Image (cartoon, coloured by chain):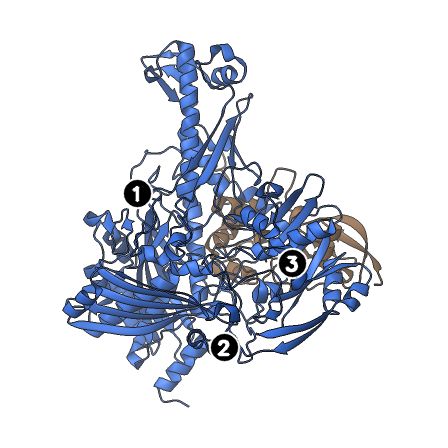
Amino acid sequence: MKRVRLELTVNDASHALDVEPRTTLLDALRDHLRLTGAHAGCEHGVCGACTVLIDGAPARSCLTFAVQCDGLAITTIEGLAPAPGELSPVQDAFCETHGMQCGYCTPAMILTAHALLAKNPSPSRDDIVEAISANICRCTGYAQIIEAVALAADRMRGLNRPPEPA
Amino acid sequence: MSEPGRFRFISSDRRVREDRRFVVGKGNFAADIVPEGLKHVALVTSPHPAARIVSIDKSAALALPGVHYVLDGEELAAATNALAAGLDTPLVPRRPLAVGTARYAGEWVVAVVADSRALAEDAAELVEIEYEPLPFVLDAEEACEGGILVHEDHGTNVLLDRTFVWGEVEADFAASPRTFKHRVKWGRSATVPIETFAVTASWDPWREILDVWASIQMPKFPDQIAGALKIPMSSVRVHFDVDVGGSYGVKRGIKHAVLIGHLAKRLGCPVRLIEDRLENMRGGDMHGPERLFDVEAAYGDDGVIRSMKIRALDNVGAYAGRSPFQLGKPVGAIVGPYKIKSVQYQAIAVLSNKTVQEAVRAFGQSPTNYAIERTMDEVANQLGMDRLEIRRRNLIRHEEFPYPIPSGSTYDSGNYEAVIAKVLAQAPYEEMIAERDRLRGEGFLAGIGIASCLEPSGGNSSFEPLLNPKNTTTTWMDSCRISVDLGGAITATMHTTSAGQGHETLVGTVVGEVLGLDPEYVRVVRADSLNSLPSNSPVGSRMAIMLGGAAFHAANKLKAKLVAIGAHDLGLPPEDVTFADGEVFATNAPDRRRSWMDLIVIAHRNFHKLPPDMEPGLSVSHIMQVPTGGKLPTPDGRVQMYPCYSFEFHLVLMSIDPDLGKPHIQRYVIGHDCGTVINPKIVRGMTMGGIAHGLGAALMEEFTYNEDGLLTAQTFMDYLLPSAHEVPPVEMVHHETPSPHTVFGQKGSGESGYLGAPAVLASAVNDGLRPLGIVVNSLPMRMTTLADRIAEARGEP
């Protein structure tokens, strides 16, 4: 099959790829770049396990061709931790509330939460539910995920800072 | 917790250690493992519910560049044994690819191996298969009649039909002034993990080892692969460090692993199959029970139920796996939390031309709980009695434990009335009733749902000998090994995969508790099947009891060894020293002590300082038998099924839009008692997730078939999974009644929530629709169905 060359910018790094035109962004990330944090769940755009951020907005990488992303900024879960062994505030909040079990939908949930909090630093419960309702989790019943996002929002607004010295 | 200070780490609100790798996308899922030279499989599946396979033309597929092999069922069957089945049904052979006849739509017929999955799919489309369609049967009762046989050689569609009578059923019925009989139906659904089943296998012909990386939750998995592939079990190395992306019972994957194992051996290269969603929904063999219950209760004017007759007819699909055992587990809690003196239970498993059924969370207990709870509600309605009151009159009381039920199990402990009281106070119940009545006044249909039920836990496998007399299983062990290295660091090893249950956290917490050391210092790793101790996978809500128990006993053996070393080096008898915080000291002279590192150095380097006859080094293990297990069933089918019984009480306020039929859960309160909680975050998560699963089964999810025998709910567009919009906030109240059979008093909680959510939602819907004279006795209760029933009752067109 004919192949195409493209340049993907993933987590601020540029990658030259040579792929079949039918290659999805999900397969390009997983198979070509070995970024395996994005997961295939349904491959028809319902479950959201493949979610990545494209120019900051959550998108289904299973329904997006890699060639469509030439020149766009893609963020995957591998791009969130500030340094090896460290966690972003959202990642840490998911650990604090145990907002997961099997971990399969988790990277997508966390990317979705990052996108929400970038737009809306003080989301209500309904805002959080609305944002994550495109991501199916079969383990948790969502309660501890919703709590994780709310906790991350609190922390990122600085509400858990120690009091200023008098 | 009930006794503050009883534990140092157990029950504390600790983080779950597994979470750190998942939040950064560094889980080790089966699809993430890519050996060099990996080839990919796609499947050609039957478009007919029943058909003779007349011919298979592979030539066009094989001609495609990059295609390596096209395997059919005849060739695979010639090289392998049939898959293991639970019941003694040798004339119902089950194999990964259909042989001669396809028996359900979506059954795998041909496997194509190619350089990429996309190419394998291209080639799969080029395989030409000629079929001769055959008559088929979908309905369980029609299948029982046997007009159309799914497996001709078996001579009947019935796999199992056994009637148990426990206690004086006929006498109790004769002595009861009232009886009530009804039929309730549990629809075909499953827990449907977001990760489909995935397996990679690689054969090394020089070492003669088949390496297998699979997303599994399957007892005796290496044994079954070896048996089917006709190789010794010591030639199968299953890697248990694969993270499983959700299972809740269904990730059995034995046919997948045998197919891929055979291909890896045949081709001499690593091969993998990752089901796409269609392959998973149609042919992944992960549908759950589809069960008709006929329940008859005998009771008095006082609402006390004396006896019950249950007929459970389960449509298990086209082949016999382990699933018919799902009719056996409920024997261990066949009276629910109630003092019903006698029971007749007829369990029937019947074949049909539907997808093969597999184990689903709670292994048949949730459908049974639903049937019992629907019966309690309807008996209350017959008497004009409050639904809470009838439960109060029948519940086993705290002082009556341990409580033997007619079918042979003895419930370990419980305080049902205390759990219920906490839930009613949390609601508060009177206000909930007032709110229901206010909603009714506003023109809504509104109802209150009530369900009280049990979670048998501790995953024994007594249903195997109960339903298959040739099976003599009386142990279902689990294991833990603990080593301390010469630097003093602790590593504990577990011997199964996990699918999100937090077992590494469990082991770390238990070992830390026993040794008095911070659990964070305990490394937890997983063996592979060639260097593992015997274990049986995390099924049947067993790991807190069994893996937690094994870790406890192993840690105590380690502690005993350290005490012996320290005492010997101090020149004291072991009873005169104390072990605390990893140190040994003379009990009456605490400054005479040996530090952790002193003890480690002696064990690893100073044989001359060890007590006589002690092995050097520090490595201990424990293989744990299930508490209360070990006996075969009696001839009349009585056996201790599981050791522990968790309790949950659900209370729901629901409104139903009278025009749309849409249920809205206004309040959901659950009271939960799983004995001592080892990790509160995990127990809460299990319960919330179980409720979401139950909500799906009750209101949304069903594998529907059309009249042509084709599965019509085969994508997530038509098999609907609850999102964050559908799952309501749930208030959870705890109670703790320790089990006398476990090391910390813990019971299981892996299925919690799912045990009672379908029952409570059915209770709420029926309370809401009762003013219209509507009874809904079939799951799922979809809003379209409810809207039609409401319109019909109101005389609307």
The three-letter code of the residue at mark 3 reads: Ala
Q: Are marks 2 and 1 on the same chain?
A: yes
Chain B on-screen colour: blue
Horizontal arrangement in the rendering, residue B41 relative to residue B782 (left or right)? right
Residue beneath label 3, please?
B78
The kind of residue on which mark 2 rests is Ile
- Residue B619 image point, x, y percent: 50, 26
Q: Earlier in the sequence, mark 3 or mark 2?
A: 3
Please report the residue visible at 27 percent of the width from the left and 73 percent of the height from the top: B181
Residue A33 located left or right of residue B406:
right
Q: Could you give the CA–CA distance between mark 1 and mark 3, rounded to whole angstroms?
A: 53 Å
Query: Secondary structure under badge 1?
Result: loop
Q: Quadrant of the C terminus of chain B?
A: bottom left
**Chain A palette colour:** brown
Labelled disc at residue B148: 2
**Separation of residues labelled 3 and 2 (CA atoms):** 28 Å
Residue B554, percent from left and from top: 43, 31
Q: CA distance from mark 2 to mark 1?
A: 51 Å
Q: Chain of mark 2?
A: B
Q: Looking at the rendering, in which quadrant would you find the N terminus of chain B?
A: top left
Q: Which residue is mark 1?
A: B738
Q: Position of residue B318 (x, y in %)?
A: 52, 68
Q: Earlier in the sequence, mark 1 or mark 3?
A: 3
Residue B522 shows up from this direction: yes
- Residue A95, placed above or below residue B124: above
The earlier-in-sequence mark between 2 and 1 is 2
